[in-house]
Image: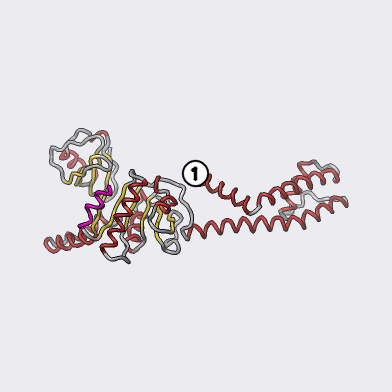
Amino acid sequence: MKVKSLMQRFIQFCIQENLHRVFVVVFVLLFLSGFAISLLEKDLSFVDGLWWSIVTLTTVGYGDISPATFGGRAIAVFLMLFGIGVLGTLSATLAGFLIEKRIKEDRGMGKIEFSDHIIMCGWNRRANFIYQELRKDPSTAETPIVIIDTIEKKPVDDDMLFLIHGECDEETFARANLADARTAVVLGNDNLPVSARDAAVVLTTLTVESINPEVYTIVELSDERNVQHCERANANEIIVHSELSSSLIARAALNHGISTVISELLAYNRGNELYKLRIPGSMVGKTFIDIFFDLKKQHQSIAVAVQRGDEGRVFSNPGEDFVLEAQDFLMLIAPERPTLS
């Protein structure tokens, strides 16, 4: 899809810059000079003449074929002199097209054509941390990430990171191809007061869900009182960062060392991590306690929750008689991503 779109843009660019006329001139010049040289030179076929024309026009000059007659040499002189100008025009125009395309992409003036990507609304210190963690995980190391923000240029040199310059409105989301995105992360603007920051997050969430109700939306809030507004906007996950950090500090004060465990689970490549895996057919119909012991013995993993469906209800530490169903996902702690069978 991306290659097709690039070709369409290139064809449109050629028409706008009259580059198609240059191509026509090149082909006509090659054909006529190849035909003429084959008539003037003895024992030279049209195919050989065309080959000589291409070699001469591109200034490669293999020397395998060279004109001996006056007419043939006159054609060669004309082709060499005229060909340099034609090729110079062609090369400069193509280079300009590629440079312009790269500058537009780096400054967020392009348009996203691919699908199944992650959109991050806003770029700040937390967004950079999220980006780094996504790139560390093998499952998202090559996933296209699209940033929507008003920054001047792309913040990280990454071929799979794209910037769409603008506010989080319908036009900008259309350029980011929200309709085909996998996940949307809505972050608060640190330059706004808390109330205005959360209001902007809620409005952005409403816009995202109205354009693509199927996208998985993760929302960051500053005030717990605004959670209900994001719930009404159908956000899939809502994270109140001030409440989360405060709760973690309180737990650490009550039970020393808890923050170390939580940090280890949340950071990639730092000991054990949290994973979410679809259960295989062999686990369907088994109880949670049976799966718990099997995972510990076979994978050195600890099951902590079950999610009913990819975006359904989460059962944390379910009872021992909890029966797993075909659409369930396991959330577990493990030193590395296990392969369930």
Amino acid type shown at disc 1: Met
Q: Quadrant of the C terminus?
A: top left
Label 1 secondary element: loop
Q: Is residue 255 above or below residue 314?
A: below
- Graded by Cα atoms within 10 Å as few (under 14), some (14 to 19) or many (20 or more), the crowding at tag 1 reads few
Which residue is rendered at x = 69% and y = 55% of the image? Answer: 87
**Residue closest to the eye, 269 or 100:** 100
Q: Residue furthest right?
A: 70
Which residue is rendered at x = 28% and y = 57% of the image? Answer: 220
**Residue closest to the eye, 168 or 315:** 168
Residue 226 on the magenta span: yes
In percent of width and height, residue 171 lies at 43, 52
In percent of width and height, residue 134 lies at 35, 54
In percent of width and height, residue 231 lies at 24, 49
Residue 209 on the magenta span: no
**Residue closest to the eye, 321 or 6:** 6
Q: Is residue 311 left or right of residue 12?
A: left
Which residue is rendered at x = 70% and y = 47% of the image? Answer: 24
Count the numbered circles shown: 1
Q: Is residue 44 left or right of residue 337?
A: right
Which residue is rendered at x = 29% and y = 52% of the image? Answer: 218
Range shown magenta: 224-234
In percent of width and height, residue 36 lies at 82, 45
Q: Which residue is mark 1?
A: 1
Magenta region's main secondary structure? helix
